[in-house]
Image (cartoon, rainbow, N blue to C red):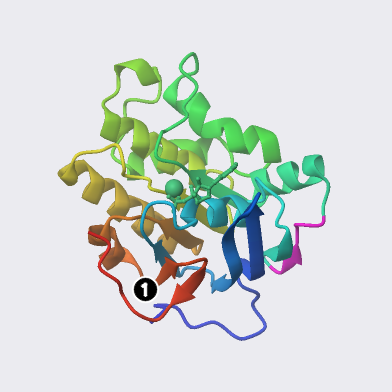
Amino acid sequence: MPRVSLPLSVPPALEGRDLQQAFGPQTVLRGVTLQVRPGEVVAVTGPSGSGKSTLLHLLGGLDTPQGGEVHWAGTRVDTLGTQVRAQRRAAQLGLVFQHHYLLEDLSVLDNVLIPTRLSGRGDEGRARDLLGRVGLAGREGAYPGVLSGGERQRVAVARALAAHPAAVLADEPTGSLDRANAQAVAQLLVNLAREEGAGVLLVTHDDRLTRYADRTLHLLDGQFTDEAPDFA
Ligand SMILES: Nc1ncnc2c1ncn2[C@@H]1O[C@H](COP(=O)(O)OP(=O)(O)O)[C@@H](O)[C@H]1O
Ligand SMILES: [Mg+2]
């Protein structure tokens, strides 16, 4: 169950309605509907190739769905032009991928500030605060190259929250980390987002991460299924 209760008038942080996507003859999503409420953590699991990343790309506005709608904080965005949507994404979403995508020639602090500079939301004080909360106080001036894999992904988590997003979308965010680091990063992401009131969509094929979610949806054959299949 969600750990927050909000009036019904508050729109979902993130919503997909009847999303459909095919690549050539292969139908990957056959009508997927989900809502993530502010402060709620929703995990999406499914076997490799089941369409998790495709779904995340549609919900993040990185691709345009062939059918259905995407809404961020109550506003439909799949009908917007690419550039307007990118601006809105910088202001309303945080993205964390399996690879950290830090810019190697920017300091840790400047990496966290990127969404702030793109959107005008958030500031350096907030970026420093977030870095402290992910355990990287004192490393603001370091360059990504000297950080461990877990530290880089913690920078990516701080960056995702820098511009006060409505929702954070994470695609296998711990997939390149060892078990201890994976759990630490997942815990940080979820705790920070909850504190900030941001919804989280956590896409993972790692069942160990679903324990951090308020609810878990299973993607199979292009739709959500009620069963919890064995993906091993
Ligand atoms: N851009 C694309 N072009 C063609 N096929 C794609 C593309 N993106 C994903 N697919 C196919 O869609 C299916 C779902 O992929 P994906 O969403 O990456 O699954 P998951 O993240 O669950 O492993 C796979 O069969 C994949 O090969
Ligand atoms: Mg994937």
Give whichever of 219, 76 is nearer the camera.
Answer: 219
Q: Give the residue pinned by disc 1.
A: 214
- The residue furthest top is 105
Q: Tell me if I can see residue 191 in this picture.
A: yes
Of residue 213 and residue 164, the one placed in the foreground of this image is 213
For mark 1, give the secondary structure: loop
Residue at image position (38%, 21%) is 144
Q: Amino acid at mark 1?
A: Asp
Q: Is residue 180 left or right of residue 137?
A: left
Q: Crowding near pointer 1: few (<14 within 10 Å), some, many (20+)?
A: some
Quadrant in which the N terminus is drawn: bottom left
**Position of 180 compared to 230: left or right?**
left
Q: Looking at the image, is 215 positioned above or below residue 49?
A: below
Horizontal side of 154 relative to 224 (left or right) equals left
Residue bounds of the magenta highlight:
74-79
Q: Residue at x 74, y 42 (%)?
A: 87
Q: Give the percent coordinates (x, y) of residue 76.
A: 76, 64
Instruction: Relative to 200, say whether 6 is above or below.
Output: below
Q: Residue furthest bottom?
A: 8
What residue do we see at 28% from left, 39% from top?
135
